[in-house]
Image (cartoon, grey):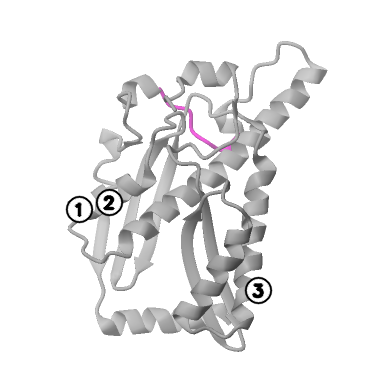
Amino acid sequence: MKPQSASSSLKNPVKFRMPTAENLVPIRLDIEIDGQRFKDAFTWNPNDPDSEVVVFAKRTVKDLKLPPAFVTQIAQSIQSQLTEFRSYEGQDMHTGEKVVPIKLDLRVNHTVIKDHFFWDMNNFESDPEEFARTFCEDMKIEDPEVGPAIAIAVREQLYEIAKQSVASARESRANKKGRRGMEHPSASKVGLPALDLGKLFSIKSSVVRKKRDADAYEPIVDHLSNEEVDALEAKEERLAR
């Protein structure tokens, strides 16, 4: 799909989908049964048959040697997240003339990543996975679990913004019924910054770091010791309780 121009998307809303080349649903699992906890995050193709959900849940439980009770909980959690995503399909969304802020604040095993950049909501050829791979290469991150975690974090934030864009389009239609000729709500009405795309992006780029913010938002990557990881995990465990 070719990138939408900012001006055309303001006048002609697009149908809901992830603003990325692949229309994948970010799925996050955090399930605890009888004191045993399972956490995972991955993407799912919403066009795959629902029968695949149970197959995946059974395979996961078998591979990780989890108690059988996890099968139902994993399947139900995935299915509920897919159902929510599909509930937006077919609805209009306004991507508008805007780029949106994306924030990374992650810990994956011994690696901590902090970053802040902007993403073009009108580039439907963007690729969070490719961005994550490039990020890891540039920052010399060797842990193979970091890249997928970054891509999921980006996709989750884009998904939330896409849902807000559906609400914006819905509000616009409601306002039009009561008042002819009313303009579409600006990005600021749903808390999203509207910037001049022409100044910030080339035709294929998705991510930008504004020059004046380069120092403030320079990526930070820290590597933790075993003791620091143990302390953080103990703290997270206490908070989870």
Q: Dot 2: few (<14), some (14–19), or many (≥20) neighbours within 10 Å?
A: some
Q: Give the quarter of the figure containing the N terminus.
A: top left
Q: Position of residue 142 (x, y in %)?
A: 21, 64
Label 1, on which residue? 137
Q: Is residue 103 magenta?
A: no
**Three-letter residue code for mark 1:** Glu
Which percent across, then down, holds residue 200? 33, 26
Residue wearing tag 3:
72
* Res. 127 image quadrant: top left
Q: Are marks 2 and 1 in contact (CB under 8 Å)?
A: yes
Q: Dot 1: what SS?
A: helix
Above-or-below relation of 68 to 208? below
Residues drawn in magenta: 190-196
> Label 2, on which residue?
133
Q: Position of residue 107 (x, y in %)?
A: 36, 67
173 sits to left or right of 127 = right
The three-letter code of the residue at mark 3 reads: Thr
